Image: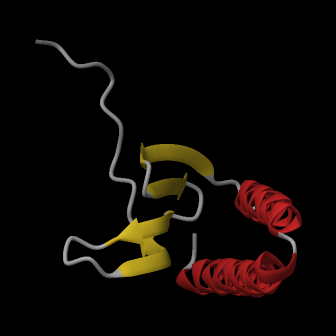
Amino acid sequence: MEPDETDTIVQEIRTTLDNLFLAEKQARLQVSALEEQQYPLAATFEMVSDMDTGTAIEEALDRFGFEYHSIDEDAELWISDEYGLMVFLYFTDPDGRYYNYRIVTFDVVGEEEGVST
């Protein structure tokens, strides 16, 4: 894939994820406001918002042809061999800094036809 095509895809993914994370932050503010008035309603709203955001992220990355790989409870990895891109979601740096996502490019070097021991 050409670098210009990859750059376009990265920008589309970045815009999509930024919009989804912004919507999630707005929902969290609404939950905070509701908690003071009606805690059960706030808890339900938060659960539904989390599910909606998760589904929207999954649908967006599926649309771009990414495959999901679970790393641990703090991070998800989505990989697209076609675009040579990896998207880390909910990535926590070893020094404790937290990232909503990180997009990394890679080259597919080749596949081994079988591993003999």
Left or right for 98, reference 27? left
Front-most of residues 47 and 16: 47
Give me the residue at 49% from left, 67% from top.
Answer: 90
Q: Position of residue 79 (x, y in %)?
A: 52, 54
Q: From this viewpoint, which residue is outermost toward the front?
A: 37
Front-most of residues 1 and 32: 32
Left or right for 23, reference 90? right
Q: Quadrant of residue 54?
A: bottom right
Q: Position of residue 80 (x, y in %)?
A: 57, 56
The relative height of residue 86 versus residue 79 in the rendered view (above or below) is: below
Give me the residue at 30% from left, 30% from top.
Answer: 112
Question: How many numbered circles are shown?
Answer: 0
Give the colour scheme shown.
secondary structure
Left or right for 74, reference 45? left
The C terminus lies in quadrant: top left
Q: From this viewpoint, which residue is outermost toward the top?
A: 117
Q: Position of residue 64 (x, y in %)?
A: 73, 62
Asked whether the viewer can see residue 48, the reply is yes
Give me the residue at 78% from left, 62% from top.
Answer: 43
Front-most of residues 35 and 82: 35
Front-most of residues 64 and 52: 52
Q: Position of residue 36 (x, y in %)?
A: 78, 82
Give me the residue at 35% from left, 37% from top.
Answer: 111
Asked whether the viewer can see residue 80, the reply is no
The N terminus lies in quadrant: bottom right
